[in-house]
Amino acid sequence: MRKAGRHFLQIPGPSALSDRILSAISQQTINHRGADFSEVGQRALNGLKSIFKTDEHVFIYPASGTGAWEAALVNTLSSGERVLMFETGHFATKRKKLAQKLGRRPEFISGDWRRGAAPDKIEA
């Protein structure tokens, strides 16, 4: 019988998680409409202001990578506009289909996703 090793988070992973993070994940969730969450959320927003070096409002967009892609596509491009996309992993072809579904025209550059985007192909 094969004994499994330490579990990895696989979004997009695998990513090793420290014991501190695993311990935090194992805690009971808090009510997202309660006072405890409000306190944690406010601390997070204030911390983000520090990270982004701003005194302005910071907004959190709670979504997966797909949600971020959708927000970017619909808020920066109009229907029929072209978007250059480079294959950088497993989900790249799904993002291409999402762009098409939203009426954008993806120009998809296939590549070796293990090496990242190739600047010369993007420039061409």
Image (cartoon, helix red, strand yellow):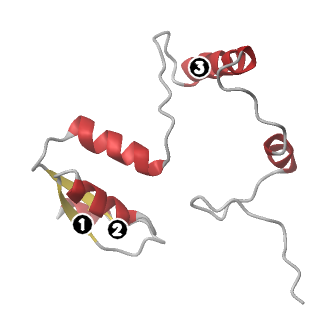
Dot 3 corresponds to which residue?
45
Badge 3 or badge 2: first in the primary sequence: 3
In the image, residue 63 lies at what x, y percent? 49, 41
The mark nearer the N terminus, 3 or 1, is 3
Marks 2 and 1: in contact by CB < 8 Å? yes
At label 2, the amino acid type is Thr
x and y percentages locating residue 120 in the rendered image: 26, 65
Q: Is residue 74 left or right of residue 8?
A: left
Q: Tell me the residue at 16%/65% (across/down).
A: 124
Report the disc number at residue 93: 2
Q: Are discs 3 and 2 less than 8 Å apart at CB?
A: no
Q: Secondary structure at mark 2?
A: helix
Instruction: Report the quarter where the N terminus lies.
Output: bottom right
The image position of residue 78, as x and y in percent, is 14, 41
Asked if 45 appears above or below 114 in the picture, the reply is: above
Is residue 117 visible in the rendered image? The answer is: no
Q: Which residue is mark 1?
A: 108
Q: Is residue 97 visible?
A: yes
Q: Closest to the observer: 56 or 61? A: 61
Q: Residue at x 48, y 19 (%)?
A: 58
Three-letter amino acid code at the position of disc 1: Phe
Element class at badge 3: helix
Vertical relation: 71 (above or below) 96? above
